[in-house]
Each structure stands twice: as structure tokens, then as C-alpha cells.
Image (cartoon, rainbow, N blue to C red):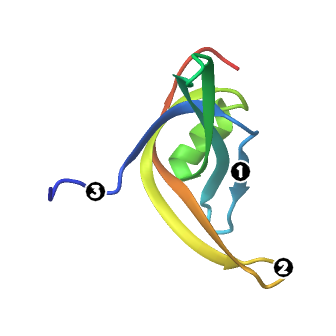
Amino acid sequence: MSTIRNKVQLIGNVGNTPEITNLDTSKKVARLSLATNDYYRNQKGESVQDTQWHNLVAWNKQAEIIENYVPKGKEIAIEGKLISRSYEDKEGNKRYVTEILVSEILLLGSKA
């Protein structure tokens, strides 16, 4: 069990145009959503599609790849780790966010 660690691997389609931010420190960050689909049959025998949405964050090299080659709708595979954080919104309410910090990206399918 000592080899188990915080690791996420997903294949899905990009749900929005990636948001790219260039920071003053010459670093780049990309934020985007990824949709993954699961298919099953319900009790009536009907085919059901279950879509889950994941928030992705990528820095530097991965952010550059996303900026140059990943439009909305593109199928990608990613590997990363889960990160959780909290912040206060404009009304002072505490909000919690879980994101995937991307360490590897693989472009799949044809151009979207």
C-alpha cells in the first residue's frame, strides 16, 4: 500500500475554451473543464449517459500545450493529482474547490 499516492488519470472532452493567464513572474497557467462520460443501462433497459465535469489547472509547459493545441471540444488524456482549496467569495461566504493539477497531457482524436 505504500506505493499508492494521489494520482488521477482521465480521458474526456474539453468543455470550454481554456482560460490562459500570463503571470508577472513569466509563468503561465491554464484553467479548463473536462467532461468524462460513463454509459450504463437503467432498470428499464434504457441506455443512460452520465457526464461528470472536472476542473483542470495546468502550469507552464502544459499550459503552453493547452494554449496552442487544445480548443473547446478536443479529446485529451491527462494525468495529475487532486488539489483542494478554499476561498471567500464577494459576499464573504467560504467556498471550497477541488481541481486536478495536470502533470501530463496527451492530445487524442482529430482536431476539434
Amino acid at circle 1: Ile
Q: Position of residue 78 (x, y in %)?
A: 47, 38
Residue hosting label 2: 90
Q: Determine the image quadrant of residue 49.
A: top right
Q: Position of residue 42 (x, y in %)?
A: 57, 25
Q: Residue at x 53, y 44 (%)?
A: 62
Vertical side of 6 occupied by 71: above or below: above
Name the residue carrying label 1: 20
- Other-residue count near label 2 (Cα within 10 Å), few / some / many at <14 / 14–19 / ≥20: few
Which element type, helix, strand or loop, lies under badge 3? loop
- Sequence-first tag of 3 and 2: 3
**Residue extending furthest toward the right:** 91
Asked whether, in this view, residue 84 is left or right of residue 5, the answer is right
Q: Residue at x 78, y 77 (%)?
A: 89
| Image height of 87 relative to 103, above or below | below
Residue beneath the point at 71% across and 56% down: 21
Q: How many marks?
A: 3
